[in-house]
Image: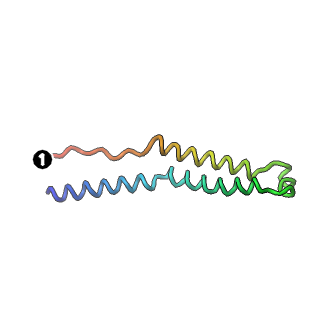
Amino acid sequence: MSDLHNEVSELERKSATAARLFDIRRIIGGLFVVYGVIVTIAGITASDADLRKAEDININLWTGLGMLALGLFFLGWLWLRPTAAPAQEPEDD
């Protein structure tokens, strides 16, 4: 019984580690930061013709900065409030 309990405990620990690794906040935050950098660079390098099309509003720059802010918010949230490991249940012997 002890070997089975140890094996189950080990699997629970590995499962908790995988859950923290694939936390949705990490995935969303990372994608928004990556895409935000790309869109911000597109906004910084926008030509005058592109700005005239958008009525002199650099929409790529503002959207990219917004995406960066949102991505950093998600990553900060993950850093400040990490997922808790499951509580250990008391053993019944």
What residue lies at 51% left-to-right and 50% top-to-bottom?
Answer: 25
In the rendered image, residue 9, in percent from the top left (x then y), is placed at: 25, 54
What residue lies at 50% left-to-right and 52% top-to-bottom?
Answer: 26
Judge from the rendering whether residue 70 lies leftward or rightward of residue 59; answer left or right. Answer: left
Taking the view exactly as shown, the residue that stands out farthest to the left is 93
* Element type at mark 1: loop
In the rendered image, residue 20, in percent from the top left (x then y), is placed at: 41, 52
In the rendered image, residue 63, in percent from the top left (x then y), is placed at: 70, 50
Along the line of sight, which residue is nearer the eye, 47 or 59? 47
Reading the image, the residue beneath label 1 is 93
Number of numbered labels in the structure image: 1
How is colour applied across the structure in the image? rainbow
Which amino acid type is marked by label 1? Asp
Mark 1, other Cα within 10 Å: few <14 / some 14–19 / many ≥20: few
The quarter of the picture where the N terminus appears is bottom left
Judge from the rendering whether residue 78 lies leftward or rightward of residue 52; answer left or right. Answer: left
- Image: 19 above or below 82: below
What residue lies at 59% left-to-right and 49% top-to-bottom?
Answer: 71
What residue lies at 73% left-to-right and 47% top-to-bottom?
Answer: 62
